[in-house]
Image (tube, rainbow, N blue to C red):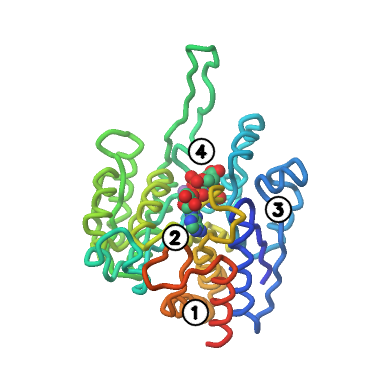
Amino acid sequence: MKIAVLPGDGIGQEIIPQAVKALKAAGGHLPLDLNQGEIGWTSVVASGEALPQSTIDLIDRSDAILFGAIGGPEYEDWKRKNPRGSPLLRLRQDMKLFANYRPITLFPELINASPIKAELIQGLDLLIIRELNGDIYFGEPRGMVSDTPGQRESINTMRYTEAQIRQVAHAGFKAARRRRKKLCSVDKANVLETMLLWRDVVTEVGREYPDVELTHLFVDAAAMELIRRPTHFDVIVTGNMFGDILSDEAAMLTGSLGMLPSASIGTGAKGLFEPIHGSAPDIAGKDIANPLAAILSAALMLRYGFELEEEAQRIEGAVRQVLARGLRTGDIMEKGATRVGTQEMGEAVAKAIAAG
Ligand code: NAD
Ligand code: IPM
Ligand code: MN
């Protein structure tokens, strides 16, 4: 079980060590082989490259990747002068990780931590499947059309092939089949041809899954429905950009962006597991970030990367226990709870795993 551990930047450096503790506690009996690599700004500072060859080699030798986050103001600045593309996007594309699973589940212990009324989120359990290899993220042409002052112009292209849509649609229907058999496809077919194709292809694929109820929503309405009645959703399948945006919105239903893990799965066996949040430069280095999204990503790695359901559940059960004891990082803090830091939270989860 070779695992490439890539903490990256900002709070990535703080949360990933907590996920590693959880992995070691849950998988002490397994042949875990964890190897750390550099990526992002941390790597630029160390070697001048955002995705150095040593990290590519490490990934090649690994069975799964545990990823923190990359980015921050210095990095965004550097990237403008070194436009070689985001290393994370490159990994997603090179590893053909076309489906990004973002489970939005509410720990009942956090029902009052969400800014949304308790009665609207009670029992919340939905899954967003975000297409990860296409859309405006990768479409050509892209870039600066003109840099003449006063007439500056740049372009990005929203682009999808039928094959890309079909692939992620199958992932959506299959996931719905294992759950409550409802799939909602989110697009913007009323305006964009790319999204008209999206709707047509998802509908065609749906004929192979007559047991799954397929509905369609335009993305603006979906954003609203996610707040109005989020428990009506089972599985949402959507494009790369809409999935990015809707999942940050949906995270708040669970209390915080710091709670949401994700699994990126492709045609190969090797998956990438990462919290959905970023490097959070505003809180980095203060030991206050919530490590639970990273810890829960490690659980997803055990479940989907290694088919170790029992070990995955041990991590998730321990998270629940720690929340039940009232331990909270600042982002999910509520009255009467005990405020803990990143490391303290990580240690409490690891201890609960070892004890359970
Ligand atoms: P962000 O997700 O880093 O932060 C958004 C807000 O959520 C901030 O207020 C932050 O403090 C808070 N937050 C995020 N994670 C948290 C956690 N675990 N615990 C508590 N609070 C948390 O998004 P941003 O500020 O828009 O972006 C910062 C940088 O991160 C940018 O460079 C962006 O490109 C990058 N980014 C990277 C990834 C990734 O590597 N997968 C994902 C998103 C953003
Ligand atoms: C995410 C992030 C990334 C994305 C960025 C950092 C490239 O927001 O993983 O959700 O937009 O996919
Ligand atoms: Mn995002």
Along the polypeptide, which appears first: circle 3 or circle 1?
A: 3
- Callout 3: SS: loop
> On the image, numbered disc 1 is attached to which residue?
318
Q: Which residue is pictured at 50% across the width and 68% down the height?
A: 296
**Residue 53 x, y percent position in the rendering:** 75, 48
- Callout 1: SS: helix
Q: Residues within 10 Å of mark 3 (few under 14, many from 20)?
A: many
**Residue 56 x, y percent position in the rendering:** 71, 52
Image quadrant where residue 237 sits: bottom left
Instruction: Report the Cα–Cα distance between label 4 and label 2.
Output: 33 Å
Mark 2 close to ligand 1, CB under 8 Å = yes
Instruction: Report the Cα–Cα distance between label 3 and label 1.
Output: 29 Å
> On the image, numbered disc 3 is attached to which residue?
38
Instruction: Report the Cα–Cα distance between label 1 and label 4.
Output: 39 Å
What is the quadrant of the N terminus in the image?
bottom right
**Residue 103 x, y percent position in the rendering:** 40, 63
Identify the amino acid type marked 1.
Answer: Ala
